[in-house]
Amino acid sequence: MMKKWILALLSPVLSLFFSTSLFAETAEQLKTELEQLPAELRQFTSVTVKDPKFNPGRPTIVSWSENLRIYHEESTKLEPARVKRVEDELNSQLSSKGYQVAQDSKETRYYLHAIAAIGGDEKQESLGRIVGLSAGLGGHQVQLDRGSLALIIIDKNTRQMMWRSKVQIFTEKSLPANIRNERLRMAVAELLSELPTL
């Protein structure tokens, strides 16, 4: 009876220990896999422009003006789950920096616009013209498409563009899901790296 009682008491502790060890091992394995990628798939470039008057404080409520807009080649099939994954990652990292992402209301201070481009020069240039930014990732010597993600923050009252950023990476469809997800997390972190933390 005593052994059963001790095992019942230790069960949550052992479960936490093994799950933590498994997480650490998985994270280390993922890091190794990323380091083994070709050099071009480890490149990220970004550029950010900030209006001097953009000084958000707590609380800052932001709302999406529309869903993520994506420019892509006609031959590229966009899976809804992947689009949602990008939107969820943006929301998660914005929240972690202290921004309250909510439905549009009278408390909303800024509107968010996210635009992405997948493909060659034509799609990248289209996005560049819209946001007025070029992330500068060279691709002429690399036989890979590029993926770009831009975020624009607009003052709800004045309609002025207060902050904008763009990140660009090379893309490879054959990468496993865990690597794609981690590269997305890293790309969004790079995109928001100069966004003030509240």
Image: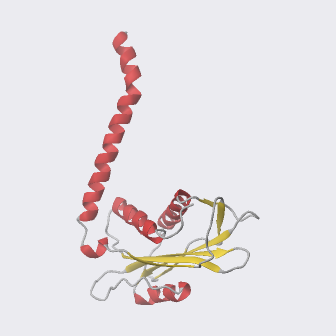
Q: Residue 163, percent across and down? A: 57, 76
Q: Residue at image x 34%, y 35%?
A: 17
Q: How is the image coloured?
A: secondary structure
Q: Residue at image x 41%, y 21%?
A: 9
Q: Residue at image x 39%, y 85%?
A: 136
Left or right: where 111 falls relative to 165: right
Image quarter in which the C terminus is found: bottom right
Q: Residue 185, percent across and down? A: 42, 63
Left or right: where 197 falls relative to 66: left
Q: Residue 182, percent across and down? A: 38, 61
Q: Give the residue furthest to the top.
A: 1
Where on the picture, by quarter, is residue 51?
bottom right
Is the residue 109 above or below the residue 6 in the image?
Answer: below
Image quarter in which the N terminus is found: top left
Is the residue 17 above or below the residue 92 in the image?
Answer: above
Is the residue 139 above or below the residue 5 in the image?
Answer: below
Query: Is residue 149 or residue 134 the one in the foreground?
Result: 134
Count of marks, rendered view: 0
Query: Is residue 57 or residue 65 the one in the foreground?
Result: 57
Q: Residue at image x 46%, y 71%?
A: 191
Where on the picture, by quarter, is residue 172?
bottom left
Q: Give the residue furthest to the right.
A: 106
Left or right: where 184 falls relative to 132: left
